[in-house]
Amino acid sequence: MGSRTELVEDLMERFPHVPREAVFKEDLLRGGVAFDPSALSDNESGEVKPKSYFIFSFDHGTLPELGEAALRRPPEEIILTGGPYDLRRTVVSVRVNPASPYRVAAGEDGMLGLYLDGKRIADVGVPPMPEYYRHTLSNGKSVMEVAPTIQWGYLIYLTVFRVCQYFGAKEECQYCDINHNWRQHKAAGRPYTGVKDVEEILEALEIIDRYDTAKASTAYTLTGGAITSKVAGRDEADFYGHYAKAIEERFPGRWIGKVVAQALPKADVQRFKDYGVQIYHPNYEVWDEYLFKMYCPGKERYVGRDEWHKRILDSAEVFGARNVIPNFVAGVEMAEPFGFKTVDEAIASTTEGLRFFMSHGITPRFTTWCPEPTTPLGKANPQGAPLEYHIRLLQAYRQTMEDFGLTSPPGYGPPGPGRAVFSVSSFMDSLPAEETAGDTAGDTAEAPAEV
């Protein structure tokens, strides 16, 4: 293909059952977007909600390489609408890439637009600064640092442990920059709390609850790096679980409680449940046995792929299969030097994994791989996986769900093009819009109001 526009249009024509919005969204997530200075925020003192760097960098360059975008943060997310492709409302997580063919800039009328190959292809909306971000904790910390919200205000993202105990080349997942992201923010002098105090979390949530009068925030996720020994004297289940216990005691039923942790033994998983967690995300990262060993060496060493999968199935006995939602990193299947060489092979492998879990009633979800340059796979694969892989994955994902009679998982907001708010992949955008069963753990079928 001679241009990115030709590539995108060819894929939209070849895969008409995949929403056109999802084609653009996946391309922006896999390859990033550049920002004209006119489209950057004024950080926490402005009118636009800035990017919080809530766990990973999700950028195609380090902070020093991002230019003005490192000083004036881009928005947390953007919304695409209209344009020559008549796009329905599409929420996209911002991944900065100064070299991207996509660019967000203000036009002559002052309105922001998304430009591809120099042509305006969509109107761009940015999230307004939420009222709760304008208030600080009693110790002066910002709500954005302690309890940022993403997915257009739907999800409170509580990264309570900002580093991972899988450390170094022989243990770190080869696509993950959590430890580097911690280092770069500390080097830049930005506030970036390593272990968040439970009382700070509760105070931040008090502020959100007070000022989020539209109740747009519907769920929270407790997450952070893997714990192989202890943090603050607690093992992984107790460490992440004690935050959930405190939140549920202070705010019973206010939010859907989710935790992202390793695949733990059943007794530990039961502790999560006892603490009040409603949804468990024991991420399996990549399906293929060899790639799991090569790309997740710490997880292979401490747990092992087969045991990891067994624990995922066991956890369904605690939470119910519908509330166990493991993530995988879509695209690393094709990462050099060990990944599949063809899209056909990669899709076949990933679909095998989907069928394995969905046959047990467990619905995985996925994050579109962003090849961060400080990671081994990001360095070796700066272009990420082919866009065709991501589009065919959406097709395979929906078909596999239909094969097993499954519906969209809870805790992700409404599904369907023009309605979805999940911003780091298009799996919710690609599911049927008429489906309303998504958030049974406290769901509203309506799209949340803008924050």
Image (spheres, helix red, strand yellow):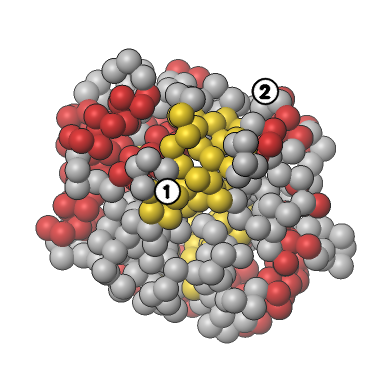
Q: Is residue 419 above or below residue 28?
A: below
x, y percent for residue 270 = 43, 71
Q: Is residue 228 above or below residue 120?
A: below
User: Is 291 displayed left or right of 406 in the figure?
Assistant: right
Residue shown at the point (68%, 63%) measured from the top left: 130
Farthest left residue in view: 403
| Amino acid residing under circle 2 | Glu
Q: Which mark is residue 82?
A: 1
- Closer to the camera, 204 or 49? 49
Which residue is label 2 attached to?
A: 65
Query: Where is the C terminus found, in terms of image quarters?
Result: bottom right
Q: Is residue 356 visible?
A: no
Q: Is residue 201 above or below residue 332?
A: below
User: Is 117 displayed left or right of 340 in the figure?
Assistant: right
- Closer to the camera, 448 or 364? 448
Residue shown at the point (75%, 46%) measured from the top left: 43
Helix, strand or loop at label 1? It is strand
Sequence-first tag of 2 and 1: 2
